[in-house]
Amino acid sequence: MDVANTQAVLTQLFDRFGVEPMRLHIGKPFIGKGVFSTDGAYWQHSRNLIKPMFARAQVSDFTALDLHLSRMMNRIPQDGSTIDLQVLFKLMFLDHSTEFLFGESAETQLTGSPDAVGSELLTIFDAALSGLGKRILLGRLRVLFLWDRSYDRLASSVHAIVDHYIDKAISREDNKKELQNRFPEKFKRYIILDDLLKTVQDRVEIRNHIINIFLPGRDATAIGLSGVCFLLARHPYAWHKLRAEVLSLKGFRLLMPANRNMRLCLKDCVLPSGGGPDGKKPIFVPQGTQVSVNFGAMQRDKDIWGEDADEFRPERWEDMKTGWHYIPFSGGPRICPGQQIALTECAYVLVRLMQNFRAMENRDPEMAFIEQSRLTVESRNGVKVALIPL
């Protein structure tokens, strides 16, 4: 899909394209009703509820992230031996995101004493997410899974774990005064679940909102950062030249955590291009048509980026302004509400790595990026590198 059609689907014709018919029925046993699975009034309600939470989350406060980042840095070998950064990033951001969401970290980086409930959540959530992704991709062919009850059992297990955190949040609220006196530092942190309890009374609705936030938030930043480091390790000059956030974070162009969005046409409409012999005339889209907003293909379009579109060349951003040709966080009313947090945290982690290591060396004999796709796209081989201390 070209830039004009992408902008039309995500903005001007927003009300005529939706996700609910494709996601809600399939996802209801797992993620329920929320910002990821609905359209219309309920989506707007969910969005209005969640968006201010990210604004209140103090994007520039790195206190909580610092703890988990320091633990990750301590796990990086100082002798130049090989590590998989993708694994380390995932564990770090899981610990950080569970603390941000639930008020308690999964502590997966503490190999001696990880939080058992948090670690179990990661394993079960990934398995349930895989089941959800397969059913969404198969569309009507999902009937092939009709007799497979493992997805429902996994979803129930996720619900039980999230309910456990809800119970603890309710207990925190009930004993807030006493706990504030005993653990004042904990009450200085912003916790999404605690904020939800102030405005939503129904436990199932609270659980659904939390899962809809956790779904993209648990490892999307880790995967995006892994993509940047995958490219930096294969282009040493870029690591050494890196002097500003913009030269690194634009690595999202080639290796995006989410490289496409599916929409269903809810009402007959006309898109600005795709028709006529040359594909440049308007085209009629009847109700019920499924369209793919393919960010990944758009980021490699030579009509937009030039003949070197497939090359990692950070310098291109020095004289280029971003627009609808570059939307790693989608666009329009459904744009990711956590994009500023994700970008800021990516930049912060990269700066910390560069303060402590003078070089990043690729240690993977496979130079190409081999995709592994669930609902996000990551490197199947991980990001195998060596970091060379100062």
Image (cartoon, rainbow, N blue to C red):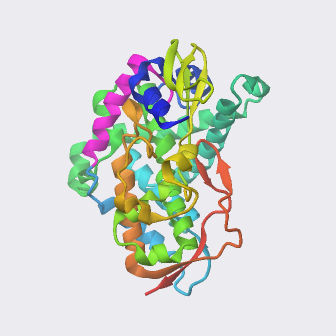
Left or right: residue 202 versus residue 286 is left
**Residue 357 picture quarter:** bottom left
- Farthest residue toward the front? 277
Magenta segment: does it hold 45? yes
Query: What x and y, as percent, mark residue 184?
Result: 22, 56
Residue located 53% across and 31% down the image: 31
The answer to whether residue 334 is above or below residue 172 is above
Q: Residue at x 68, y 31 (%)?
A: 135
Left or right placement of residue 105 versus residue 57 in this view: right
Give the left or right position of residue 15, taking residue 232 as reference: left
Residue at left 38%, top 32%?
332
Residue 68 in view, yes or no:
no
- The quadrant of the picture occupied by the N terminus is top right
Secondary structure mainly formed by the magenta segment: helix
Viewer-side residue, 205 vs 248: 248
Which of 187 and 277 lies nearest the eye of the viewer?
A: 277
Q: Position of residue 158 (x, y in %)?
A: 57, 38
For the residue pair 63 and 284, the one nearer the viewer reads as 284
Q: Quadrant of residue 80?
A: bottom right
> For the magenta stretch, what is the residue range?
36-57
Q: Is residue 336 left or right of residue 172?
A: right
- Give the residue at x 43% y 32%: 7
Find residue 212 and report its horizontal and vertical position in percent: 47, 35
Based on the picture, tell me whether residue 208 belongs to the magenta stretch.
Answer: no
- Where in the figure is residue 204, as x and y percent of width and height? 46, 26
| Quadrant of res 96 | bottom left
Is 65 drawn above or below residue 322 in the view shown? Answer: below
